[in-house]
């Protein structure tokens, strides 16, 4: 008999996830919700830790330097908030947890790159994610269309008012001439 926890976790598990390893430089596209607006924010950095590789709780920790300060974010790969993960660069590493990278900056923080087939690694098709991205794009297009219509109405009203003012102005000039 399957447990309710497993049933619930299988419901949210993505059909396919990019194979990310420690030492990879990745771009994580994360959905951010602010009020009633949604947007996609990209966080690019070095994967310093991976955990639970074959589980729906698979997590990666990504580190980057921002304004001279190290910033680390942890992402659940099967989370609905993580839209897409792209592997930009693969590096040669011999351990899973690269904690030593925290103390390194500049040239000492560089890692030896390894050739890899970026297209094969990053081509993971998840229909649900693609549908969600399409939905967000359609919402943005509808909002832009509504704003354009609103602006057109405002410009039309302004043009009417300008025509009325000009007509009154011409009328007063004609009255002054008589």
Image: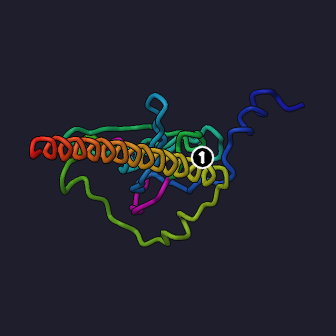
User: Is 164 placed above or below 127 here?
Assistant: above
Work out whether residue 102 or residue 117 is closer to the camera in this orientation and state it: 117
**Does residue 36 belong to the magenta stretch?**
no
Q: Which residue is found at the position 63% from the left and 60% from the top?
A: 125
Image quadrant where residue 124 sits:
bottom right
Q: Is residue 84 visible?
A: yes
Q: Which residue is found at the position 45% from the left and 42% from the top?
A: 39
Quarter in which the N terminus is drawn: top right
Give the secondary structure at mark 1. loop
Q: Position of residue 107 (x, y in %)?
A: 19, 57
Image quadrant where residue 162 sits:
top left
Residue marked by disc 1: 53
Residue closest to the far left: 177
Q: Position of residue 112 (x, y in %)?
A: 32, 64
Answer left or right for 54 relative to 139: right
**Does residue 86 belong to the magenta stretch?**
yes
Highlighted magenta segment, given as a residue range = 85-101
Q: Which residue is found at the position 45% from the left and 59% from the top?
A: 87
Q: Position of residue 41 (x, y in %)?
A: 41, 45
Q: Position of residue 121 (x, y in %)?
A: 54, 65
Q: Is residue 95 visible?
A: no
Residue closest to the far right: 1
């Amino acid at each position: 008999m399957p447990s309710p926890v497993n049933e619930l976790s299988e419901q949210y598990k993505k059909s396919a996830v990019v194979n990310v390893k420690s030492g990879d430089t990745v771009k994580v596209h994360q959905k951010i919700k602010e009020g009633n607006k949604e947007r996609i924010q990209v966080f690019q950095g070095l994967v310093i830790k991976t955990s639970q590789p074959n589980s729906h709780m698979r997590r990666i920790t990504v580190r980057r330097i921002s304004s001279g300060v190290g910033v680390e974010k942890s992402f659940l790969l099967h989370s609905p908030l993580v839209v897409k993960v792209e592997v930009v660069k693969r590096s040669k590493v011999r351990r899973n947890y690269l904690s030593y990278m925290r103390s390194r900056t500049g040239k000492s923080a560089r890692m030896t790159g390894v050739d890899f087939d970026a297209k094969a690694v990053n081509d993971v098709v998840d229909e649900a994610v693609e549908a969600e991205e399409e939905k967000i794009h359609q919402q943005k297009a509808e909002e832009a269309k509504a704003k354009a219509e609103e602006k057109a109405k405002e410009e039309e009203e302004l043009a009417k008012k300008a025509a009325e003012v000009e007509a009154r102005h011409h009328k007063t000039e004609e009255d002054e001439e008589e």
